[in-house]
Image (tube, rainbow, N blue to C red):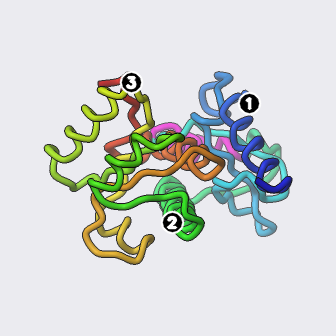
Amino acid sequence: MGLAARKREEEEEGAMERQRRCIVSGEIMSDANLVRFVAAPDGEIVPDVAGKLPGRGLWVEANRKAIAQAVEKKLFARAAKAQVKASADLADRTEKALVTRMLGDLGLARRSGQLVLGFDNVLREMDAAKPPSLLVEASDGAVDGKRKLYNAAHARELKPAMLESLSSEELGLALGRQNVIHAAVQPGGLATRLILDAQRLSGLREPSLRTERDK
């Protein structure tokens, strides 16, 4: 792994541990449970799911109710101490931004050889020297297939995160294949980032991220 890639991975892992204050509840939470927003040059509040945009970060718990309250009660303007505006569809835009980023990362994972597709390939990957840290299951996939993979992971004493918030159509568009139901991502920066984003997405879209410990 190159120095730049290692640094990105460390940054993503660190994001799981950093603490921020939600401008709605006032609670201090992990970045994994918050979304960063910033004011664009025209004063419009935009979601910054990558955490890269310039400007003061305004953090809101990653769920629709909190984002709606921030919009309705004009809490972004209060926190920014400036005349900023937030549109009523901000939660929808946040969800779309997270999904777009996640699908892009899944495509990148496939191109870099860090992702496997298909039930049999995922099952074999569980016996690899470095088993997957993330299983991806289409939200509209058959329950039986998912259960078999969950049970296989449990039998091997593996505890991968489970990402089940994306449809087979969305996965197919990202991965260039039709009817994508089962996939797995090897440990690394991309898997860590996908797990982080799936946690954030869980308040905006169901089903959400699960782990074997939740079964």
Residue at left offset 36%, top offset 67%: 170
Task: Please name which of the two marks, 3 or 2, marks the residue nearer to the observer.
Answer: 3
**x 66%, y 40%: residue:** 75
Residue type of the residue flagged with mark 3: Glu
- Quadrant into which the C terminus falls: top left
* Secondary structure state at the residue bearing disc 2: helix
Residue, disc 2: 110
- Between the C-alphas of marks 3 and 2, the distance is 25 Å
Residues at discs 3 and 1 in contact (Cβ within 8 Å): no
Q: Position of residue 133 (x, y in %)?
A: 50, 40
Q: Is residue 205 visible?
A: no
131 left or right, relative to 145: right
Residue 18 image label: 1
Instruction: Look at mark 3 in the image and give the residue it sits on.
Output: 157
Tell me which segment is drawn in magenta: 65-76
> Quarter-wise, where is residue 59 in the image?
top right
Task: Give the x, y percent position of residue 66.
Answer: 52, 37
Q: CA distance from mark 3 to mark 1?
A: 29 Å
Q: What residue is drawn where x is 76% and y is 64%?
A: 40
User: Compared to 186, does 151 lie above or below?
Assistant: above
Q: Amino acid at mark 1?
A: Arg
Is 72 colored magenta in this rendering?
Answer: yes
N-term mark: 3 or 1: 1
Q: Earlier in the sequence, mark 3 or mark 2?
A: 2
Left/right of residue 52 with respect to residue 211 in the rendered view:
right
Q: Could you say which disc has been placed on residue 176 in the image?
A: none
Does residue 17 appear in the picture of this structure?
yes
Who is closer to the viewer here, 127 or 58?
127
Residue 19 part of the magenta-drawn span:
no
Of residues 94 and 187, the one nearer the viewer is 187
